[in-house]
Image (spheres, coloured by chain):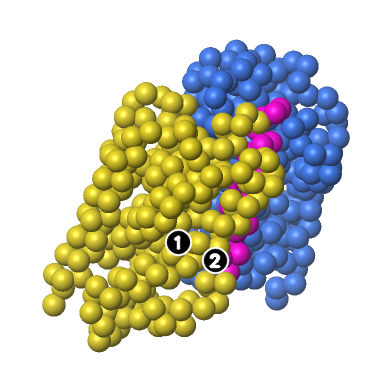
Chain colours: A blue, B yellow
Amino acid sequence: MSTAGQPHASPLTLATATRSGIGYWLAGLRSMMRFDLARARQWAALMVIIQVMMGVGMALIYGFFYPRISHQTALYITTGTPALALIPLGFVMVPASVGQQKLEGTFDFTWSLPVPRSAQATSTFLLFTLLSLPGAVLALVVAAWHYGVSLTISAQIVPGTVLCALTAVSAGFGMALMIANPLLTNLITNTLMFVVLLFSPIVYPPAHLPAWLFAIDRVLPFYNMAEVIRAGLTVGLVTDLTRSYLILAGWTMAGWIMTAWVVERRH
Amino acid sequence: MTRWHLASLRLWIMLLAVVQIMAGAGFVLGIALFFDHIPVTAALFVSTGVPVINLVLVGLILGPQLVAQQKLQQSYDFVRSLPVPQASAAAAWYTVCLLAGLPAVVVSLLIAEARYGFSFSVSPAIAPAVLLTAFTGTMIGYGLGHAVPNPMVTQLVTQLLVFVIFGFTPILFPAWQLPHWLAVVNWWFPFGHMAVIVRAGLTTGLVAGIGSSYLIVAAWGIIGAAASAWALGSRG
């Protein structure tokens, strides 16, 4: 690791460094974070802008479909907005970025860097999770202002939102790694978005759904993301919160396991 | 040229038709979930708006993306060099787009009738409405694909258009549910008017002022066709 700090040191110092252990891993994570952040400077601002536009745009669009917007409707749309800003980031932008890197060959280059791959993956998760938060918050602020909804914000909004971001990024990344063909990934993510935006009870109460459809939504991450965030913004709307947290944790783990499996499999 | 398109897109066309049908059915069915009990008007607007989206999706969105892709892959000049008059090439493309959209239109309408229990009163006016809507959508897309030099810009504009068409134009919902200024802006664009003329062919008493809608949609169709003709003619 000494070489990363001092670019002019002799390459020979590498041989003496220990290339295992928690210290080495953390140092690897640190330099990967720096590497990823430096790369992200090019597109991070644009990504946040797109994300806010998607989040705010969807929040407005849902409103247009209602002849009259009741307080309940406005509350559901507003509190669903952060999830609407996080879902496309995790399930569209992350896979798209992986796909593009695969096509350009950057992907293999990054993996060839002398840093543990688990540290590389962790760095990606941390980076995207951090980057996704400003967009989610901004989208919520705009939606709350537009619909004139007053929210009851509790402390659990912080872990809730972070977990949601992490779940979206992890599951999206794992999926993008598991599916070799970027075109197939593209098709799946687009279909997923369409289905989620219409058929997941994110901006409307689950009571509107037939029972079988709700049963599916309860095990998928999307509705649970909305629930966890909604619980931090309102009182009395959300029940069964523990279950939602567990399901999200499960999807996050699934994303990590998929990532680990692919990372291991590749030479 | 129609055969050329059908041959080069044969796998695509099948896939597209399926995607279109699923998207149409998804919208018709999904919208009911937004409400406790969906008002008849809302259901009627969505059901008569989805066919418009089915009709323009291929020509307006996928067409320019296809041309942009050809430009990137550099097969664009090859296709251009084929010994076919530009007008018949455009007509061929229009036919393909219409064919890719029509099955979805029929299926969406049938599903809507089954789900919401109303029956459409189809009048002969549906024929010109469908033909003109598909024509204008295809021609705007054609112009976008051919007249915009940078393929990346084309991609970006079409992706934005999808978003705008679904959410910010009065196709799937009545114009008065939009903020006033947005409704005014939309009056100058063809998308809301496409929905008006198609709706007029499927229902009675829901829409008025069809004349100006036909004019605006036709005008945009001509603008698109002119832009394409200019772009295709100006190259050596």
Residue at image coords 76%, 37%: A209
Mark 2: give few (<14), some (14-19) or many (20+) Cα within 10 Å.
some
Q: Position of residue B37 (x, y in %)?
A: 70, 28
CA–CA distance in space, label 1 to label 2: 8 Å
**Number of numbered labels in the structure image:** 2
Do the residues under discs 1 and 2 have CB atoms within 8 angstroms?
yes
Is residue B155 magenta-colored? Answer: no
Q: Position of residue B226 (x, y in %)?
A: 19, 60
Mark 2 lies on residue? B16
Residue at image coords 39%, 78%: B2
The kind of secondary structure the magenta stretch mainly shows is helix
Tag 2: residue type?
Answer: Leu
Tag 1: residue type?
Answer: Val
N-terminal-most mark, 1 or 2: 2
Observer-nearest of B229 and A158: B229
Q: Is residue A1 above or below residue A58?
A: below
Q: Is residue B192 visible?
A: yes
Residue at image coords 38%, 33%: B208
Segment colored magenta: B15-37
Mark 1 lies on residue? B58
Q: Is residue A80 visible?
A: no
